[in-house]
Every structure is written in C-alpha cells, then in structure tokens.
Amino acid sequence: MISPFSLQEDQLDNPLQKILLPPTDPNAEVEEIPPYKLVYVNGACPRVYRVYKADSMIGVIFQHITHWSNAVDQIRYAESVDATVGLDDFMTMTGYFTATTEQPPTEEELLDKEFDSLTSDEWERLKRYVPQAKDLVAA
C-alpha cells in the first residue's frame, strides 16, 4: 500500500525531480512536429509522450521498439507524426475539441432562430445589430 507519507519522503529525497513537465520547461524533453509538441513523460518501452497542439494537451502517444501507437485506437504507426495526427484526427472527429473551437452564432443566424429559444444575451446582441443595406436591391 502506498501512503501519502512515502510519496512525500520520495519527493524529499529528490526535490529536483519533476513529474509532467510542461513543454515550456527547460528540463522537458520536447520533440517538435509542427503544429504539435511531444513531451516525454516516462517509460522505457513504451516511452510515453504527451501531445500538445497550441497550448492544449490533446492526448498521449507511445513509442514502442518497432512502432508508435496512441491512446485512442489500436493502429500501429511507423512514425511519431502518424500516431500524433491519428490522435488529433480521432479527438477532433469525436467532438472533444468542439467546445473550445465553437464560435457563437452570427446575428444573421440568430435571426433565423425562434424568438422563444433566444437567450437574453442573444436578444441584446440583436438589439444592437444593424444589418448592412448593401445587399438590398430595389424592386
């Protein structure tokens, strides 16, 4: 059984050892594959890397002796970039990133919604909205 005291003792023995270094840490082992950064976490076989895209961690990939893999599918990849792109594609496809990339509806889109379904913030946006008259054509 691991107790919190044994973990604290380990940290006291080696206070410089950091777990899960961010990609900006000078001691982190970082491999750049634009637009991704792979940050070594631990392990020998497989070696575990956290994958960052921009400033967000999107998942984990593994370097085995003969191949690479990621944490979401059962595919064996020949290169780290393939495992990384496979991870990113899977996460995007399943909708994990839609909340951070979703844009609020435009005023034109709000005009198409039923008025009962509009929030108070959407009503305020529509009150301030002035449509562009350049698209109007005289009949």
Image: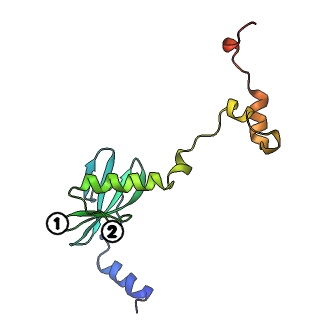
Compared to residue 76, the image places residue 82 above or below, namely above
Residue at 77% x, 42% y is: 118
Q: Disc 2 marks which amino acid? A: Lys
Residue 137 placement, left or right of 63: right
Residue 111 rendering spot, x and y as whole percentages: 74, 32
Compared to residue 80, the image places residue 111 above or below, namely above
Residue at 33% x, 44% y is: 35
Quarter of the picture containing the N terminus is bottom left
| Image mark for residue 23 | none
Q: Disc 1 marks which amino acid? A: Thr
Residue 62 rendering spot, x and y as whole percentages: 28, 65
Residue 122 placement, left or right of 82: right
Asked where in the image residue 102 lies, by quadrant, the reply is top right
Residue at 74% x, 26% y is: 129
Label 2 – label 1 distance at C-alpha = 29 Å
Identify the element where label 2 is drawn.
loop
| Residue 16 shows in the view | yes
Task: Give the residue at mark 1.
Answer: 66
